[in-house]
Amino acid sequence: MESKKRASRSGVFRLVLSPDRRAGSQARRGVRQHFSETLPGATLGDLFSVVTELVNNSVQHGPGKPITVTLVPSGGSIRGEVADQGNPANAIPELKEATATGGRGLALVDKLTARWGVYEGSTHVWFEMLRDPRAAQVV
């Protein structure tokens, strides 16, 4: 299955990916094509990191079904979702300590987003990040 990309008139970006080793790079390419002219470089880099981490988690831990990435810019923020149709029993593991081996990608997601979580009873991850985090620091 190839990736399928859609952007609606409302600005919603949706990408359906095959759950294989190319999924992370396909997600980055789609995000770059859609947002490179509308987001500051640092925000775009953070968005790449968050989406790539969540997609790679879906590839590694998911059920092998298509992965859907949805990004919705709204005002000063971006809301994102990554869904892999997985078993909720295999939901997101706890954040690991910095000294743990591997599995620290969710700590990166936690650091780069304003907030994130998993819809109850699913492996469907959502996150929110500021379009320009520097604007939030201005007093």
Image (tube, grey):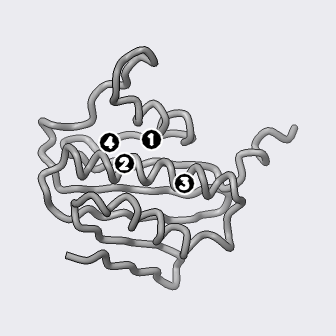
User: Callout 2: few (<14), some (14-19), or many (20+) C-alpha neighbours within 10 Å?
Assistant: many
Q: Viewed as shown, does residue 128 lie left or right of 5?
A: right
Image quarter hosting the N terminus: bottom left
Circle 1 is placed at which residue position?
A: 116
Residue 31, percent from left and from top: 50, 67
Residue 53 in percent (x, y) is at 40, 46
* Residue at image point 32% right, 62% down: 23
Q: Nearer the viewer, mark 1 or mark 2?
A: 2
Between circles 2 and 4, the one closer to the viewer is 2
Q: Nearer the viewer, mark 1 or mark 3?
A: 3
- The mark that comes first in sequence, 1 or 3, is 3
Task: Find the distance from the CA under tag 4 to the CA under tag 3.
Answer: 18 Å
**Disc 2 element:** helix
User: Crowding near pointer 4: few (<14 within 10 Å), some, many (20+)?
Assistant: some
Say which residue appears at 45% left-offset and 18% top-offset. 98
Which residue is tagged 4? 118
N-terminal of the pair, mark 3 or mark 2, is 3
| Amino acid marked by disc 1 | Trp
Q: Secondary structure at mark 3?
A: helix
State the separation of the CA atoms marked 2 and 4.
Answer: 11 Å
Q: CA distance from mark 1 to mark 2?
A: 11 Å
Task: Please name the residue shown 32% across and 42% down the image.
Answer: 118
Is 84 situated left or right of 135 in this image?
left
> What amino acid does circle 2 point to?
Leu
Name the side, left or right, on which 76 lies relative to 12: right
Residue 13 x %, y %: 46, 72
Position of 71 with respect to 130 (left or right) is left
The residue to which callout 3 is attached is: 47
Observer-side mark, 4 or 3, equals 3
